[in-house]
Amino acid sequence: MFKFRLIGIISLFSVLFVLAACSEESTSSGSSDASSNTLEVIKDRGTLNCGVNDNLTGFGVVTPDGSFEGFDIDFCKAIAAAILGDASKVEYTPLTASARFEALGSGEVDVLIRNTTWTASRDRDLGNDFTAPTFYDGQGMMVYADSNYDSIESMSGATVCVLQGTTTELNLDDRFTGSGIPYTPLTFETNDPLQAAFEAKQCEGWTTDKSGLASKRAGFPAASGGPEALVVLAETLSKEPLGPLTRDNDSELYDVVQWVVFGMMQAEESGITSANVSSMAASPADPGMARLLGVGFEGGEVQDFGFGISPDFMQNVLYQVGNYGEVYDRHLVPLGLTREGSLNAQWTDGGLIYAPPFR
Amino acid sequence: MRILLNRIRENFFGSKLDVILSITGALFIYFVLSIVISFILNSDWTLILVNRQLMLTGLMPEEEIWRVWTIFSLTAILITTSIAFWFNINIKGSIFYILLLLIPFLIFTTKNTLLYVLFIMILSIVFFYLGYRSKNSESKNIVSRIIVISWIILLPICFLILNILDGPKMTLWGGFMINLILAAIAIFAGFPLGILLALGRASSYKLIKLISTLYIEVIRGAPLVAWLLLAWFVLPKFLPNLFGLSDLNIVVRAMIVLSLFASAYIAEVIRGGLQSIPRGQEEASFALGMNSISTTIFIVLPQAIKIVIPTVVSTFIAIFKDTSLVFILAITDLLRIGRLIPEQQQAFFGKSIESLCVVALLFWVVSLVLSQISRTIEKKLNI
Amino acid sequence: MPSSLFTQFKSEDSIKKKLNLLFRNRIFRRFFIQFVFGIFLLLLFFYIVDKALNLELGFGHLNSRAGFGLSHTFIIDYNSNDSRWMGYFAGVINTIRVSLVGIVLATILGIFMGLARLSPNFLINKISTGYVEFIRNTPLLVQIIFWQLLLLQLPHISKALTFGGLTVFSNKGILLPIISSNENGSLWTLILFLGLIVSLILRSRLFKYKEEHVDLFSPNLISFFTFVVIAIISFFALSMKLSFNVPEVNVNQYGTYIQSGGFILTPQFAAVLFALVLYTGTFITEIVRGSIQSLPKGQTEAAMALGLNSYQRITLIILPQALRSIIPPLTNQYLNLTKNSSLSVAIAYPDLFMVSRTIMNNAGHALPMFVLILITYLTLSLVISLIMNIINLRVTRIGA
């Protein structure tokens, strides 16, 4: 008799917590109906699910109190500010390099802003859509300053540490094997053992995007020589345009993300910063600025581009996050990644940061 | 004194071989101990002090920690009551347990949480006393049932506490807590499933037997990391669109896969037990007029499970250790945090081995306690 | 079932009674239950197939150029221009390599520690107990990472430790001298192996022959002589040359230290190997201990009464009998070791699982890769089980 009651209680409670777990899921992860309009889902839900890096200084890191900060993180905040009016309404999901596309594809995150390179196969094969690149990068090789390596050719026979599941792994092989230079790759799943191996000089070179190298170099522990002990070779092994991505066939969100990025670039070009955005919105200097900020010019009509969000979204973005230059300066300049003369300068300064017109 | 000397001579220097072995052994122990002790004394253990919360609860935000404390206090109370009620308390054993559990406990207390910790300790002592008193009183049966039911509903209540009032997203659960939760769920769900599979494999219905055997052999054929990756990449595409099932987050999927994996191994163990029950038991119960379902539930299963309890508990321990494999799903469990701390926190660069030692210690303590429990259960059931 | 039930069926009037009759019959009931179960399975099967057809299936992507390099290649010569199939195959070879060596070492360690566990010598006993308790209760992954970190502490290659110029210890690996041969080496090894089998069979046949006839010769000597003759003849037939290969560390013009010669034990391989051997060794220790303890104590006492020393007692009496109950759980542990080798994905050892991860990252197609992984591991398990089964049959055939 007691056993039956026990069985009954067990089954009752199993059903109970399965229901609790399930219902918790369906409310927190949004509806799963056939509509692929993630923009509406985000607005319903009230938060943006952003896939990010938690392990790359300057682009995405976790601070000891559990919050996220970085270049990519700021773009997450900007999108949240645009859609929801509040840059803090973001849920960050840290993802490894090998897992990021699956997380995006399965709906776990709405947008992936995780220093991801735009390639043809990723665009088509993996079912993603890349929005405007936020950072034009290239793959580089970092070696110890006291070694005699000054070019890729000099690294014949060396061991190179690389992350698994990245374009760097393939580019590295292309460069070395294509030129007939023998090398040995050490492929790691995450950066922690990779850095440990590099610090112990198990590998002579560390290859990843140059921005990543800059961030790792800046954070190189003093016990192993500090940043001065390392040098990044001048050669760039590949083109690595990094930017946010959404799922295929998700045009509403895609357009919003793209134009938030362009808006921030345009704002820098027009001279609007987070400090002066309110005064600029009150009295815009020209019709272009008025359209960008979603206000009428000298009493004229407000132009709504039909993104599905409020027309003055750029004001929220600029006020709460800042323009492209502010975001760049805040996170990437401390790493030593200067904009002058690089691809990431404004087009007016010879770089590639160019926003299509807000018209 | 002479007896002691004689014993030493017998044990250590019995024969020529013994002499060599003893000397080698002593040298070996000295060598290992000196390395270990010098390591412990020379390394900087402040990394534990700073990262306690991170290691135990992962990325759980500060304002939700009260949930973890609630769960912890409930579990602590339940554990002490069970120990008081069911275990024979002798001085040597209890001192060993108290020491074992106190060490990680003390490591993880901070100034802020001192009040919490004291409160829990007082509560535990109170319940310990209550349990001890009721061991020999007349309400023994009721108390026994209450404790058993409390253990069974502990897991659903933990879930409730973690989710109630808009709790943190499941992907934020991390650290040691998620290892324990994953292991508990895998065992909870895997055990009944394993029983069903074992019965299916031993059944005379050919189709059911075929399917059970196929399932068990396929699941046991691939390593757990492969199944976990399958859960991540492939499972979402196979789940139906009802009840929001296709949106299951990664932690739930890990739970599902761990439970299915555990069920296959538990099924094998129970099958061994089922095979060792003499056929006479079944025949006798048929002769008494019981149908086969009753026979299975009331006669065969209880005996089979009782016989294989030691092996089953060691399978549980293996499942608990296997929860460290969820690093591949980017779930921030204890091991992943232990690897991330030396990497991300400036103060602790290069302290990977210390961090790893703490992780190993936590796993070790829990596994050791579980295996001690298994031995006590064995003794109680006279196996 | 048929006729009697059928006539009864027809003779009943109401549906309810007919159904009742059907279900009372045991054979029909069993058939019905399996039928319902079968329908349910069929539905599930169609559902899964339907969903699976939406995914990309097919192994065609494995034919394309790999594009990634591997740090460990053994036996086959793999480079990034080969197809992905070759890359996968290289991974399989790596898995087999670490599993095989691991199985051998773990068994040896386990047997020694198992015997030590039962030794009356207090120190050895406690060492063995401590070993089992510490290593068994820590997750294998933690141990692999621990060994990897430990091996990182070895000195940098520029300051490598050398012992007598024969071995080199550095954090790039441990170099050991090895006897190497020209290109026919593997063929000769194969012939040696076959020769060994032939001479062992010859030995057992000769023993049988010896029982019936007067012995003028020793079967051991003859079979050994046969083996040596085979080895020498094939050596010269293949014009083999053996040389003692001493490892050396050279610096090339750019300052890179190149290790050459000898046999290199890379830190990744070593970390996985040590962790696997120690971890599986604990389980084998417990199995050996349990088996030996389950033997009747009379055996030990009789052996001691006969005046056998402990070495003879163990090798002639205890171990052969214990072997019979050791083999099935031992097989299980070997399978576990092979599957646990997949954990080398955590450090940079390219076993088959890690290579398939790389292929999945580069090309997608997760489901076919999983099927491939599953098939590979199942095949490996099958091979190990078969071999152990043969051994089991041989061991349990003798005696009762």
Image: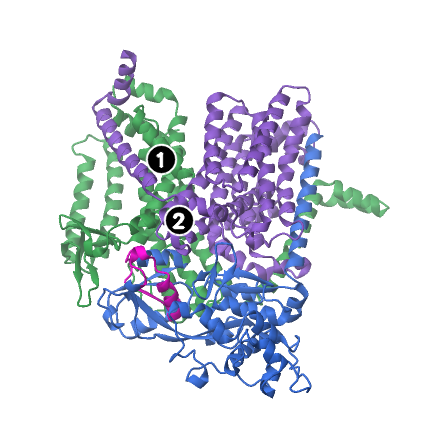
**Horizontal and vertical percent for residue B145?**
67, 29
- Read off the chain for label 2: C
Q: Callout 2: 10 Å neighbours few (<14), some, many (20+)?
A: many
Is A286 on the left or on the right of B319, as rendered? Answer: right
User: Which quarter of the picture shows residue C112?
Assistant: top left
Horizontal side of residue C177 vs A97, given as left or right: left
Compared with residue C125, is residue A64 higher up or lower down, i.e. above or below? below
Question: Where residue A281 appears, x then y in whole percent?
Answer: 61, 79
Which chain is drawn using green? C
> Count of labels shown?
2
Disc 1 marks which residue? Answer: C131
Q: Residue furthest top?
A: B2
| Image-based side of B368 in relation to C86, left or right | right
Give the residue type at disc 2.
Thr
Query: With respect to residue B126, does C205 lie above or below?
Result: below
**Mark 1 and mark 2: span between their CA atoms?**
22 Å
Q: Colour of chain B?
A: purple
Residue located beneath label 2 in the image: C338
Magenta part of the chain: A200-227
Q: Residue at horizontal 53%, vertical 38%? A: B114
Task: Identify which residue is drawn at 24% across, 25% down.
Answer: B18
Task: Chain letter for blue, please.
Answer: A
| Frontmost residue, C377 versus B66 | B66
